Image: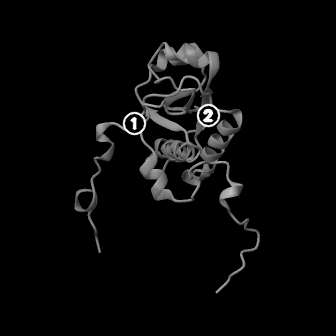
């Protein structure tokens, strides 16, 4: 049975710039790990940075409010913030931050969704990075006060995603393969 999908563009491996583009989420999830050793000689092209930020823009958020802002740090600015904290020699940082003007969705019960929304957006970036052959590492322990002063930020930094080409000796940590499964991870209510 052959169904026509009007408006859809056929995907082929040749149409994708990404080395790991098989459109297989399981493969991307298995290959992505917290890279803590980046190749200092290779930088991420502006085109790839644009693709990464486009992935963030496509991520879902509560009521599609996108209550975050991304501070993209490269070059000399990255060298300055690298003195504040080890970013493992990444060639770019995408800092997920909140803008005081956009609190995001808050439910009638007072539940805020902006942290969840930010996590979804940065996970989309991390998976896109893997698809592009880049490494990534989420970094939550940020020197916020110093980071804001160094970059002259008006937003509130929450988390950073270090990005770059993995160094030749880069490998997942010993904990990478530790995954809870089945009854350890979930309870089925039928």
Mark pair 1, 2: CA separation: 40 Å
Q: Quadrant of the N terminus?
A: bottom right
* Residue depicted at 62% across the width and 41% down the height: 52
- How many marks on residues? 2
Name, please, the residue furthest toward the front. Answer: 168
Instruction: Classify the position of the C terminus by image quarter.
Output: bottom left
Q: Which secondary structure, mark 2?
A: loop
Q: Please report contact status of discs 1 and 2: CB closer than 8 Å, yes or no.
A: no
- Front position among marks 1 and 2: 1
In the depicted view, which residue is nearer to us: 34 or 64? Answer: 34
Number of other residues with Cα within 10 Å of mark 2, as a class: few under 14, some 14 to 19, many 20 or more: few
Q: Pointer 1: what residue?
A: 171
Above or below: residue 36 compared with residue 118: above
User: Which residue is at 54% across, 18% downward?
Assistant: 148
Residue 74, image x and y in percent?
62, 23
Q: Which of marks 1 and 2 is nearer the N terminus?
A: 2
Q: How is the image coloured?
A: one colour
Q: Nearer the viewer, residue 68 or 87?
A: 87
Secondary structure beneath dot 1 equals loop
Residue 14 image-quadrant placement? bottom right
């Amino acid at each position: 049975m052959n169904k026509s999908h009007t408006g859809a563009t056929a995907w082929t491996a040749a149409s994708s710039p990404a080395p790991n583009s098989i459109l297989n989420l399981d493969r991307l999830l298995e290959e992505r790990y917290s890279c803590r050793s980046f190749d200092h000689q290779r930088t991420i092209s502006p085109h790839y940075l644009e693709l990464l930020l486009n992935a963030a823009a496509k991520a879902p958020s509560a009521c599609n409010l996108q209550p975050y802002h991304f501070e993209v740090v490269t070059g000399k600015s990255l060298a300055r913030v690298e003195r504040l904290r080890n970013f493992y020699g990444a060639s770019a940082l995408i800092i997920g931050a909140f803008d005081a003007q956009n609190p995001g969705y808050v439910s009638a019960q007072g539940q805020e969704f902006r942290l969840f929304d930010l996590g979804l957006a940065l996970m989309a970036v991390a998976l896109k990075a893997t698809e592009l052959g880049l490494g990534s590492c989420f970094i939550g322990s940020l020197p916020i006060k110093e980071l804001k002063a160094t970059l002259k930020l008006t937003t509130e930094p929450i988390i950073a995603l270090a990005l770059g080409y993995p160094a030749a000796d880069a490998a997942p940590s010993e904990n990478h393969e530790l995954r809870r499964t089945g009854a350890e991870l979930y309870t089925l209510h039928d």
